[in-house]
Amino acid sequence: MKFCWSTLTVKNLEESIKFYQDLVGLEVNRRFQAGPGTEIAFLGSGETKIELICNQAKPQIAIGKDISWGFEVDSVDRMMQTVQQKGIQIEGGPFQPNPQTKFFYVLDPNGMKIQFVENH
């Protein structure tokens, strides 16, 4: 069995695509209309793929507070600077649970917790 992607229902597809392209570095792989008022975008390639679904008939979405997506970065310190320069609030961290791992959290435009992780 192979993991395909993780899906997130979003409030604003353009805003979400911009976040995942500009901050995380994921490119749009596919984007299409999936019925009246519904658009889907797949971002990423290889092992990292996410699906964003925007349904105009569903203006309220619920993101679980105990769920996060983690993305590996070369430097937590540099990524924290990038996040702050873009005006994005750091929600937690940096944390270093062991000498090899350091991470921090931000929220995406929908309230999804995004973890940026540096592994040595």
Image (cartoon, grey):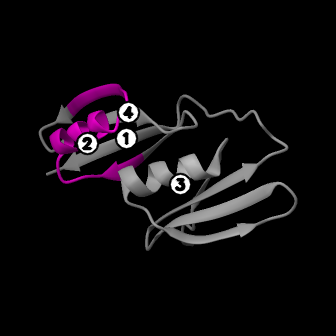
Q: Residues within 10 Å of mark 2 (few under 14, many from 20)?
A: few
Q: What amino acid is labelled 3 in the image? A: Ile
Which of the two marks, 3 or 1, is nearer to us in this view?
Answer: 3
Q: Residues within 10 Å of mark 4 (few under 14, many from 20)?
A: some
Lower position in the chain sequence, tag 2 or tag 3: 3
Q: Which residue is tagged 3?
A: 17
Q: Nearer the viewer, residue 118 or 97?
A: 118
Q: CA distance from mark 2 to mark 1?
A: 14 Å
Q: Is mark 2 in CB contact (under 8 Å) with mark 3? A: no
Q: Position of residue 25 (x, y in %)?
A: 37, 59
Which of the two marks, 2 or 1, is nearer to us in this view?
Answer: 2
Q: Which residue is tagged 1?
A: 115
Q: Is mark 1 in CB contact (under 8 Å) with mark 4? A: no
Q: Is residue 5 above or below residue 20?
A: below
**Judging from the image, what secondary structure is the residue with disc 1 in?**
strand
Q: Which residue is tagged 2?
A: 82
**Judging from the image, what secondary structure is the residue with disc 3 in?**
helix
Q: What amino acid is labelled 2 in the image? A: Thr
Q: Which residues are magenta?
A: 70-96
Q: What amino acid is labelled 4 in the image? A: Ile
Q: Is mark 4 in CB contact (under 8 Å) with mark 2? A: no
**Judging from the image, what secondary structure is the residue with disc 2 in?**
helix
Q: Which residue is tagged 4?
A: 88
Q: Is residue 112 left or right of residue 97?
A: right
Q: Is residue 73 magenta?
A: yes
Lower position in the chain sequence, tag 4 or tag 2: 2
Q: Position of residue 20 (x, y in %)?
A: 46, 53
